[in-house]
Amino acid sequence: MMPEHTIALERVNTPPAQTWNYLRANDISLMVPSRSRKGDVYFALPRLFGGVECGMGPQVTTWIESQSTDAQYVEVPAGQIRTEPIVASMDTGVMVRAGATATIVVCQDTKDAISQESAPLTSASLVRIIAERNAHVRVFEFVTATDVNQHVESVGIVAGKDAHIEVRQFFLGTQTSAAGLVCALDGNRSRLDLTCRYLARDTDTLDINHVVRQRGRLTRSEVHESGVLDGKAKKSLRATIDLIHGSSGSEGTELETVLMLSDDVTNKTMPVILCDEDDVAGNHGASIGTVAPEQIQYLRDRGLTHEEAEQLYVRALFDEALICAPNSAARDAVLRRATEVLGATVANDLIEGLGLSSLEEG
Amino acid sequence: MQDQLLRVSGLSAGTEDKPILQDVDLTVGAGQTHVLMGPNGAGKSTLGHVVMGDPTYIVSAGSIVFDGKDITEDSADKRSLAGIFLSYQAPVEVPGVPLYSYLRTITQKRPELKMTARKFRSRVGDIADQLDMNSSFLTRELNVGFSGGEKKKIEMLQLLLLQPKLAILDETDSGLDVDALSVVSRGIEAYRQDCDGALLIITHNTRILERLSVDRTHVMVQGRMVAEGPASLIDEIDAHGFEQFEHTGGEQQ
Ligand SMILES: Nc1ncnc2c1ncn2[C@@H]1O[C@H](COP(=O)(O)OP(=O)(O)OP(=O)(O)O)[C@@H](O)[C@H]1O
Ligand SMILES: [Mg+2]
């Protein structure tokens, strides 16, 4: 028998509650390469991480575990303020002990992309994070590559009492990107601030699944997605705020803004608020559309053509990604992509403009 | 004629179904300061937007000449690059665009303002100081969630950054507290001094004019220019309101 080179990830990246399927936006199915790891010595993560729910679901977890050459485990000791970012590999588990502070960077790495004969060249990241009580965790995700056919990114976070989780996602890559994130606000008063910014152009496909499980009492979640679609891009976003029985006094807000620069894009959004508790609040807002005429006029009054005004929204994505990039690898990745999208002149200007980050801190 | 920076002649304009401006004449010389007054709904803001080139309004008669060139048919971005700046009465919120990205982009369109990103940052920092603004606003989205007064300051910041030949300030002073008002009037003075720019100030409030020497005052009622005079006309309006002109406006119709 020939070794199998490809496996199918069927209907992954699903939300907790499937809606009627006429939108065909409940999930994504992907063909991914599969390489044999026979004979490798492989270190798995501590068992505890097996219980962390990840955004793209168990099939993806199993597949990435089977493809990763090693698992990376990082522990930040109680009370430590770790300033040096933890750089995630293909399979990473981070334990942030009580009262500790950590920054985790998930930067798409195509050097590790999995290639198998006829299978699509695929890069992948699996990141599981446990934040104990009072921990403060910042997660930065950058998907920017153009030299793979698809990218799969699955993140799972568990937050203890009073833990604060901040996530900033930048999905700026090409072809197919699928990314899922679950954040379980298990501890009382734990909170999540998730910002997701994306760009999809040409024939790109972007599939996003965000799930917040609010279990603890008095938890808070703020989930903001916004992005730009152009060309014939297809984007699906599933965003679920799950206010679980017992989460009294909790509040979750989800807000999406989509800007469509072409008539040929496909934009599917499925916001869901699940509520099994009386004393909670779930809010959802969305604004979808082209740039409002009065916004365009304001920009034109200051000297930009219609097209330049639209491109400003794209440049803004990169400016923001650069301001956020916590290490040079992420910065370089964003700049490389910026050069392709905006041209070298603007990208160089972004580099020079990097001094901005110090302005922001000041 | 050379020093006539802006010449609006016989201008009539309005929306598709509503005439607003009728037969308006207005001339502003280079480096001069003019004031445009008039009751609510007279058409002052409309005139500003029509001069700027807002396609919401259709010009049915007349012409606009700026810096020796007929710009009546030009798009707003061309007029902006030619040196006209309109500060909005109500600045538009632009979500998704940080102020920094925006300011850098509009500056880079102007060859005369070419500078390195580094120099640009320090220039913006200086102007922000001058206007008593915290530079942390640079990473915030353009005009989003800013108070009315802060939005007006962001307009001033752009005025000082772009250094246009003509600035039309549409109620730049409304919504400002006393301190902000004095900061902004200092900003206007700085604009006058630094680039010898011309001003057309639309206002209901004469305080902002105290520090400026006004060359000419214009009064608009119901879409028409009904009076024009020296700076002293402002005091007259302050004392007696627009009633005298409203009468004239009625007669002309
Ligand atoms: N886009 C528009 N569509 C419809 N009507 C408009 C539009 N713009 C202005 N108008 C109308 O034209 C008239 C003049 O408005 P404009 O805003 O120019 O007045 P103004 O003199 O600036 O008043 P204020 O002192 O209150 O700012 C008003 O009746 C206004 O409702
Ligand atoms: Mg007005």
Image (spheres, coloured by chain):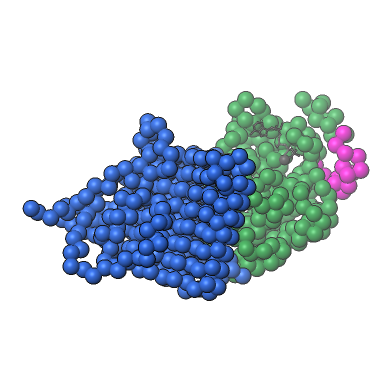
Chain colours: A blue, B green
At 77% from the left and 58% from the top, the residue drawn is: B180
Image-based side of A313 in relation to B50, left or right: left
Residue drawn at x 50%, y 44% is: A242
The picture quadrant where one finds residue A81 is bottom right
Q: Residue furthest left?
A: A1
Q: Position of residue A329 (x, y in %)?
A: 39, 69
Q: Is residue A107 above or below residue B65?
A: below
The stretch of residues the image draws in magenta is B228-243
Question: In the image shown, does B206 or B180 lie closer to the viewer?
Answer: B180
Between B100 and B8, the one lying in front of the other is: B100
The verdict on residue B152 being magenta is: no
Please state the horizontal and vertical placement of residue A328, each as a whole percent of the image: 42, 71
Query: In the displayed structure, would residue A263 be above or below residue A337?
Result: above
Q: Can I make out residue A304 in this image?
A: no
Residue located 64% across and 32% down the image: B13
Most foreground residue, A65 or A178: A65
> Is the magenta region chiefly helix, strand or loop?
helix
The number of numbered badges drawn on the structure is: 0
Residue A346 location (% of width, % of height) = 44, 61
| Screen quadrant of the C terminus of chain B | top right
Q: Nearer the viewer, residue A176 or A315?
A: A176
Residue placed furthest toward the right: B239
Q: Would you say B213 lies left or right of B147 here? A: right
Asked whether B241 falls inside the magenta stretch, the response is: yes
The relative height of residue A62 versus residue B242 in the rendered view (above or below) is below
Residue A12 visible, this orientation: yes
Residue A260 screen position, x and y as percent: 44, 42
